[in-house]
């Protein structure tokens, strides 16, 4: 099984490719019984959640994915986008 960080990166890469989005910010939190990854998007729609599910299934077929890994979408605030852009200056 690949490590959690690699699993998350692979899922995000497939999600970005399938959705046409790029440079998405993620946040990973370790919980006692699971690992939660949030992928921040401007507007999480049903379509994007479907793409995320497809992406996770694709990565699961490719690798032995940790069943305790939870990946979800979260609305990205304007402040978060601004601070990410400002850090690139």
Image (cartoon, helix red, strand yellow):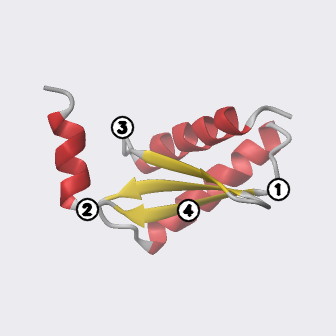
N-terminal of the pair, mark 1 or mark 3, is 3
Name the residue at 72% across, 43% down. 59
Residue 84, x across and y down, in percent: 24, 40
Instruction: Evaluate if marks 4 and 3 touch, with contact meaning CB atoms under 8 Å apart.
Output: no
N-terminal of the pair, mark 3 or mark 2, is 3
N-terminal of the pair, mark 2 or mark 1, is 1
Does 53 appear above or below 89?
A: below
Instruction: Evaluate if marks 1 and 3 touch, with contact meaning CB atoms under 8 Å apart.
Output: no
Measure the alpha-carbon separation of dots 3 and 2: 15 Å
Instruction: Give me the disc on residue 67.
Output: 1
Which residue is tagged 4? 72
Q: Does residue 67 appear left or right of residue 12 in this picture?
A: right
Instruction: Evaluate if marks 2 and 4 touch, with contact meaning CB atoms under 8 Å apart.
Output: no
Q: Does residue 77 appear left or right of residue 35 in this picture?
A: left
Query: Would you call the spot at circle 1 few (<14 residues within 10 Å), some (14-19), or many (20 or more)?
Result: few
Residue 24, x across and y down, in percent: 39, 44
Name the residue at 15% across, 36% down. 86
Which residue is tagged 3? 23
Measure the alpha-carbon separation of dots 4 and 3: 16 Å
**Where, quadrant-wise, is the N terminus in this rendering?**
top right
Measure the alpha-carbon separation of dots 1 and 3: 26 Å
Secondary structure found at label 1: loop
> 2 or 61: nearer the eye?
2
N-terminal of the pair, mark 2 or mark 4, is 4
Instruction: Evaluate if marks 3 and 2 touch, with contact meaning CB atoms under 8 Å apart.
Output: no
Which residue is tagged 2? 77
Secondary structure found at label 4: strand
Name the residue at 44% across, 50% down. 19
């Amino acid at each position: 099984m690949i490590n959690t960080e690699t699993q998350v990166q692979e899922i995000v890469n497939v999600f970005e490719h399938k959705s046409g989005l790029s440079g998405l910010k993620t946040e990973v939190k370790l919980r006692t019984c699971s690992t939660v990854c949030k992928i921040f998007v401007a507007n999480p729609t049903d379509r994007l959640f479907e793409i995320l599910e497809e992406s996770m299934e694709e990565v699961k077929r490719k690798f032995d994915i940790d069943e305790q890994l939870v990946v979800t979408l979260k609305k990205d605030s304007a402040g978060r986008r601004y601070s990410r852009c400002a850090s690139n200056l």
